[in-house]
Amino acid sequence: MNRLVDLAKVLRSKNSGPFEITLDILFDNPASYNRVAESGIINVQTICQLYHLEPADISKIIFFEKALGIKVTYNRTVSSGTFRDRDVYGAQQHAPLMDILIP
């Protein structure tokens, strides 16, 4: 097994508007992308567990083979820049993805 951080070229997060966060998982080769995509590990249940969300909070999970990327968008618990927001740009939210184990 490998950690997702060891297979992906880029793991990042960012605002997707003031009310959503987008997680990007990008690969530099088809073998790694296919391994992760075919594992089924990146799914609503996994994202909900990692981010303490409900399934309704997941806007979308998109597997885009041509770009060797996976995009996950979920609702923020607090809108960007408001009271109790600790990451106004959403740039520090990718860390929970790093240690996902991929068979």
Image (spheres, helix red, strand yellow):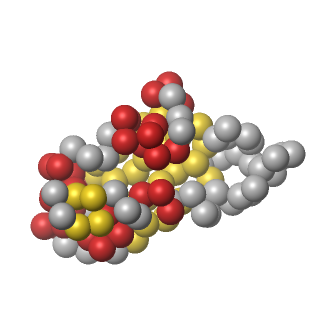
Residue 58 visible in image? yes
Vertical position of residue 19 compared to residue 11: above or below: above
**Residue at 37% across / 35% down in the picture?**
45
Is 85 left, or right, of 68 in this rendering? right
Residue 26 visible in image? no
Q: Residue furthest right?
A: 83
**Residue at 46% across / 37% down in the picture?**
48
Vertical position of residue 70 compared to residue 61: above or below: below
Is 86 left, or right, of 8 in this rendering? right
Q: Position of residue 96 (x, y in %)?
A: 47, 57
**Residue at 35% across / 69% down in the picture?**
5
| Residue situated in front as seen by the camera: 32 or 97 | 97
| Residue situated in front as seen by the camera: 20 or 49 | 49
Q: Quadrant where the N terminus lies?
A: bottom left
Q: Position of residue 57 (x, y in %)?
A: 53, 31
- Tag count in the figure? 0
**Residue at 52% across / 44% down in the picture?**
51
Q: Residue furthest top?
A: 56
Q: Position of residue 24 (x, y in %)?
A: 43, 58
Is 34 left, or right, of 83 in this rendering? left
Q: Quadrant where the C terminus lies?
A: bottom left
